[in-house]
Amino acid sequence: MSSVLMVLTSAKFWSQKDGTQRPTGFWAEEFVVPHRTLVEAGVDITIATPGGLPARADELGLSVSANGGDTEKVARLRAYLESAKDLLASPVRLEDVDPQDYDAVLIPGGHGPMQDLAVNADIGRVLRAMLNDPAKVVASLCHGPASFMAAGQEDGSWLFKGRRLTAFTDAEEEQVGLSANATWLLEERLRGAGAHFESGPAWSSYVVVDGNLVTGQNPASGEAAANALLKELAARVGSA
């Protein structure tokens, strides 16, 4: 059985340019869809957060408006979160994680990672160990690649420089009306650090696989990213 470390934000607020604190958390769909896909494939999943603090879904991601007016989808998301409430309430401490214990790491988004994981030394440590090991896989969705900003090599260079990847685009951030008050934008920051950023049409599923790095652009990319992760796991450990 393959083992995946799922790292979630524990941030409750996202600091804005004007000094306000916007409520945040992880994006429900980006947890639910990959988690369900991996569990159904027989993968063993461990959830971790900074400090082992409870992981909470951003209520915006559970609104009907953010889910295309689909009330049944929202009900399914809430039901899955309820079924996983004990896992989300008592994650392991990211500080205690040994990356050698896992075959892959998966980091869902929501704006929370821009608040805590982007500056977290331990996610940087985990990412460095896994991306530098061709037998392991690093996967992330939407704003999850904000965590990549915390990952440096021992020589001081950025771990993801020159790697092909995708994430929530600046255009999508603008379309949801959150770019103007953001202290920084993810696509811009990733490009500026040296990533080869790729993207598809806004809000459509788009996944980039670059060796042992799997990234999905937005919430709609969750299932495709999870399946790409399973494919890469099977190729490396043969047990997914």
Image (cartoon, grey):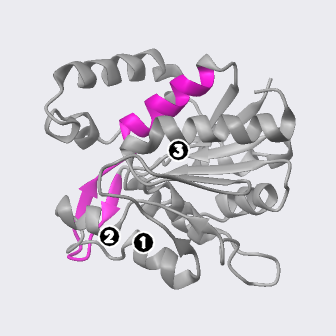
Q: CA distance from mark 3 to mark 2?
A: 22 Å
Tag 3 near tag 2, CB within 8 Å: no
State yes or no: residue 19 in magenta: yes
**Residues drawn in magenta:** 13-39
Sequence-wise, the earlier of marks 1 and 2 is 2
- Say what secondary structure mark 2 lies in: helix
Estimate the x, y position of residue 59 in percent, counting from the top left: 26, 38
Q: Secondary structure at mark 3?
A: loop
Task: Give the number of the mark in front: 3 or 2.
Answer: 2
Q: Position of residue 76 (x, y in %)?
A: 32, 18
Q: Do the numbered discs 1 and 2 sit on residues whose CB atoms are within 8 Å?
A: yes
Residue 135 in view here: yes
The answer to which of 185 and 37 lies nearer the viewer is 37
Q: Which residue is mark 1?
A: 187
Quadrant containing the N terminus in the rendered view:
top right
Q: Which residue is mark 2?
A: 170
- Amino acid carrying label 2: it is Asp
Packing grade of label 3 (10 A; few <14, some 14-19, many >=20) is many
Give amino acid for label 3. Answer: Leu
Check if residue 205 falls in the magenta segment.
Answer: no
Q: Is residue 109 left or right of residue 62?
A: right
Instruction: Please tell me which residue is depicted at 56% across the width and 74% down the height of the picture.
Output: 196
Residue 102, image x, y percentages: 79, 39
Q: Nearer the viewer, mark 3 or mark 1?
A: 1
Q: Residue at x 19, y 62 (%)?
A: 175
Foreground pick, 59 / 137: 137
- Check the image and report above or below for 103 versus 74: below
Q: Which mark is residue 8?
A: 3
